[in-house]
Image (cartoon, rainbow, N blue to C red):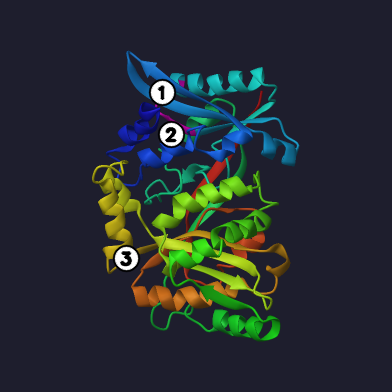
Amino acid sequence: MRAFVRFNYELYKDCPYAVPDMLEDTLETLDESCNPAFRFCQAAFFLARRDGRIVGRVAAIINKRANERWGRKEVRFGWIDFIDDQEVSKALLEAVEAWGRERGMTQIVGPLGFTDLDPEGMLTDGFDQLSTLCTIYNYPYYPQHLAQLGFEKETGWLERKVFIPRGEHEANNAKYFRIAQMVSSRYGFHLRHFRNKKEIRKGGYVEKMLGVINKAYADLYGYSELDDNQMKWYAKRFLQMLDCRYISVVENQAGEIIGVSVCMPSLSRAAQKAKSKLYPFGWWHLVRELFLCQHHQILDMLLIGVLPEYQEKGANALFFADMIPFGIHQGFEWAETHPQLEDNLAGQMQWKNLDCCIHKRRAVFAKNL
């Protein structure tokens, strides 16, 4: 399994845009004894070797919960990497197809993980853009191989580079602030920040925030609802790496969380310096970037979600009205949005008043078995 995870680093170690899987983190994700998703998922892992040398890898996953939710019989492929050789990619995907057929599946789809908090979607545009720690980077030949193997695009995501407003740029206008003030006055919405992680843990806020994400993302493509065990697992893994200054929630008049925003300074360059390993010294690069660096260039917007019944009431304006002055004060140059489904028109519209551009596209591909 270590060889499985490290192959990604070996394949991309000379690529300036790729950000490697972190060995320890990925090993935990793929470990049945650690990841609670294995309670409703089956998985198998394949390596392709030629003359004793690893030339490809892929994970085969059946998410029973997602299949039941969406009425599908899908086997997912994820964590796929291969050299530019059609024989290798064909062998890997045929292994997943055979494994899926043996278990009654009728379609293969991917790249997808166990849940939507795992990296998903193959990069189809933006190969010359720096990747993030939470998304997939792949060489341009990957989607070409899939097309030659009979796969077709099923859905896609867009990622934006949102420039922090400066000076008199038209994006640095008062619209978000006016809407934020209006919804606060009309509906009693208010933004909440946290003093420290103890406050977050004691109040069970990570679980509450992921509960909002469950409802906000429920009808989006292939979403697999997180249960209590998964929420606790993600809370334990991710909270230690987050800075409270970049976590905020919107509450309604009753004090209930209706929206969530989680951001962090980009760890892409730090992860490259760590060379995919936290230990013995890789952790220092991440800690330095998170807590010791005074001037960050990129802000990664990891999660933004608002409960469906509040999405038309301007709750997300409170996040932007808060993040814009904070981003200016912290000296960020631009923010990287999390991948958004291209057919999620409501989500796409929230960026229209900001100075931004689509700089990456990614897709999931499918084929009948």
The foreground one among 241 and 347 is 241
Task: Kindly check if marks 2 and 3 are in contact, taking CB atoms under 8 A apart as contact.
Answer: no
Residue 83 makes an appearance in the image = no
Point 70% across, 84% down: residue: 186
Residue drawn at x 58%, y 75% as measured from the top left: 317
Disc assigned to residue 85? 1
Question: Residue 141 has which mark?
Answer: 2
Of the 4 image quadrants, the one containing the N terminus is top left
Q: CA distance from mark 2 to mark 3?
A: 32 Å
> What secondary structure is found at the residue carrying circle 1?
loop
Separation of marks 3 and 1 at Cα, in angstroms? 39 Å
Q: Which label's residue is closer to the chain start, 1 or 2?
A: 1
* Quadrant position of residue 86: top left
* Span highlighted in magenta in the image: 79-86
Picture quarter with the C terminus = top right
Residue 195 pos. (x, y %)? 44, 72
As for residue 191 lying within the magenta part, the answer is no
Q: Is residue 51 above or below residue 16?
A: above
Left or right for 109, reference 119: right
Give the mark nearer the N terminus: 3 vs 1: 1
SS at circle 3: loop
Q: Amino acid at mark 1?
A: Asp
Q: Are marks 3 and 1 in contact (CB under 8 Å)?
A: no
Pick out the residue farthest to the top: 51
Q: Looking at the picture, does residue 256 appear above or below residue 161?
A: below
Taking the image as drawn, is residue 305 in sight?
yes
**Compared with residue 44, is residue 38 higher up or lower down, i.e. above or below?**
below
Residue under pointer 3: 296
Q: Nearer the viewer, residue 70 or 252?
A: 252
